[in-house]
Image (cartoon, rainbow, N blue to C red):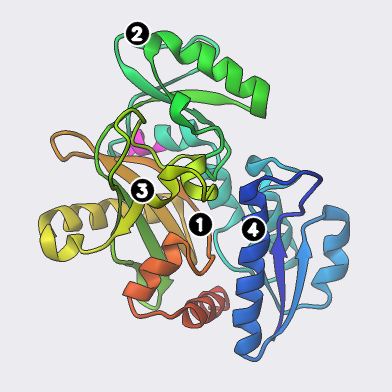
Amino acid sequence: MRILVLHSHLGPNPRADDLDTLAMADAVSGALQQSGHTVRRAGFLPHELDGLLFQCDLVFNLVENVEGQDELCAIIPTMLEKYGVPFTGASAAAIQLTSDKPATKRILRAIGVSTPDWCEAPDWRGLDSSCRYIVKSATADASLGLDDGAVVSGAMVEARATDCKRRFGGRWFAEAFIDGREFNIGLLEDASGVRVLPLAEMRFVEWDERRPRIVGYGAKWNAEDPAFSATVRHFGCEDAEPELAAALHRIAHRCWEVFGLSGYGRVDLRLDENGQPYVLELNCNPCLSPEAGFAAAARRAGYEYGQLIDHIVRTALQ
């Protein structure tokens, strides 16, 4: 087939996570070419998309932001659905539902899935000054703004959110900080509906206890940050803790169904001190770089990287 690998258009002074988007596009393009497809790569610019679509049979959608705004990603599947062009990953409706984290949390609460308490500007209703919170972007992914200062007491939430808005723009909210085990659950659509990939637990190895246990921006994108090598992905929950694994599977299936995910996706959650799972957020189109968590989980499930990319393409055509 003729496949257009569509990724975010990078402006001047791109961040480390933006540059990773290009590396991901390179890897996906290479895998598609090895499978015999004719591949064209392009950064998403709305005024150029029409011309590109006349030259492809399918779009491999890797766009993570539009003009630096993650919340605008639903534009791409909206346009592709309108033109009737097949594409990989989630629908416009699913991306729209999950691109706003507080809105996602409201839906999770409504369907009975546990998610940490949270509060939002401007009134910060429900804020408890005696509790710890993690201040997060309401719409941006890639751990933007998550550093050691992101975990604060309730009394410092508003100041932290104001500072993040000044530095990064956008909306910020505060989520009750669960200082427990963290799991990333990959989901891959197949002929039976959806498959939960082997459960990945992020472990904090030889961790500096002065730092909050979070997979922050440095842990993901800065090899010189000690957290980069101290956050280690671990598999084996299914054998070691089958009851916990079964509970996480049920939650992941519920999220997939209610939010109408398709193709592939990821559910991130943490356990509290009693082992109760709390969903933090959903990622409709998680990173597909060969060394990223989704590809690692797929390998554990028997999909080498090229097989994974080919599977995603075939699913998009069903």
Give the spatial CA distance, label 1 vs label 4: 11 Å
What element does badge 3 sit on?
helix
Q: Which residue is depicted at the point 33% across and 11% down? A: 128
Location of mark 3 (residue): 230
Residue at the location (28% across, 50% down)?
Answer: 251
Q: Residues within 10 Å of mark 4 (few under 14, many from 20)?
A: many
Report how far apart the C-alphas of labels 4 and 3 lie in the structure: 23 Å
Q: Of the numbered discs in the image, which one, if any, rests on residue 129? A: 2
SS for dot 1: loop
How many C-alpha atoms fall within 10 Å of the one at disc 2: few (<14), some, or many (≥20)? few
What main secondary structure does the magenta stretch of the protein show?
A: helix
- Which of these two is toward me, 200 or 127? 200
Q: Is residue 108 magenta?
A: yes
* 44 to 181, vertically: above or below: below
| Cα–Cα span, label 3 and label 2 | 31 Å
For residue 162, above or below residue 95? above
Which residue range is magenta in the image? Answer: 107-111
